[in-house]
Amino acid sequence: MMDARGDLKPVEAVKSQYRLQYRLEDELVRREFGYALALSSQIKRFKGHCYENLGQFDALLAQEYSAQKGGMRGNKTYSTFDGLMQVKIRVQDRIAFGPEIFAAKALFDECLNEWSEDTRAELRSFVANAFDTDKAGTINRSHVFILLNTESDDERWQNGQRAIKYAIRVIGSASYIQFQNRESTEDKFEPVTIDLAKA
């Protein structure tokens, strides 16, 4: 059997008390992984067909009415006649932060250092976490956007918010397809879960 280092080991070299366990675990993971790969491939084909079919419907509308379905950003909603099922296309900008983000951090830090006696620990921690980068070097966007909506009369704080706005760079966009339904028109729409992590 090949081990995790790529070395081939005779089955007899594996301790007897672990031999059966390792073999059964190996077979189990390979079997389940096979199902996962097949399902992943099926979902990719399904996604491709959905976009293709919706695109053909849009082309039909454009031909019939000389108009495009959806808003300026490309968001679209398709519904059944009874209003119980919807397919939504959502277009989301991918953003990055330019060097102005470091000026924003300096301004927020300056405010917090001056306010230190009156500043709650939670706010200090929140500002620090907003500008910390993860392993991929990405700044925590949701925390940064919350800072944009946190009001203060301090001009430096407002300048920091302005620096964040200047730092935002749209580097592309991603399109997502969502399915949702409901039992009756009085009910709220519920998402049809396709994401394995959320099932």
Image: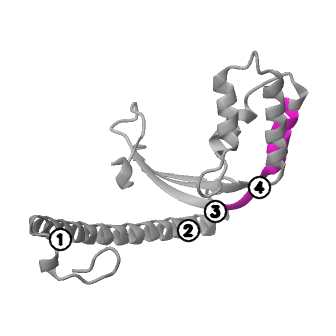
Measuring from the top left, give residue 77's x and y in whole percent. Answer: 53, 51
Q: Name the residue under label 1.
A: 27
Queried whether the magenta region covers residue 170, the answer comes back as yes
Magenta region:
157-173
Q: Name the residue under label 4.
A: 169
Nearer-N-terminus badge (4/2): 2
Q: Is residue 165 visible?
A: no
Instruction: Say left or right for 153 vs 124.
Output: right
Q: Mark 3 points at which residue?
A: 65
Q: Quadrant of residue 157?
A: top right
Nearer-N-terminus badge (4/3): 3
Disc 2 residue type (three-letter)? Leu
Instruction: Say left or right for 124 vs 115.
Output: left
Nearer-N-terminus badge (2/1): 1
Report the number of numbered marks: 4
Question: Which quarter shows the N terminus?
Answer: bottom left
Q: Name the residue under label 2.
A: 60
Measuring from the top left, give residue 170's x and y in whole percent. Answer: 74, 57
Seen at 33% across and 38% down, the residue is 183
Instruction: Say left or right for 195 vs 24.
Output: right
Q: How crowded is mark 3: few (under 14 residues within 10 Å), some or many (20 or more)?
A: few
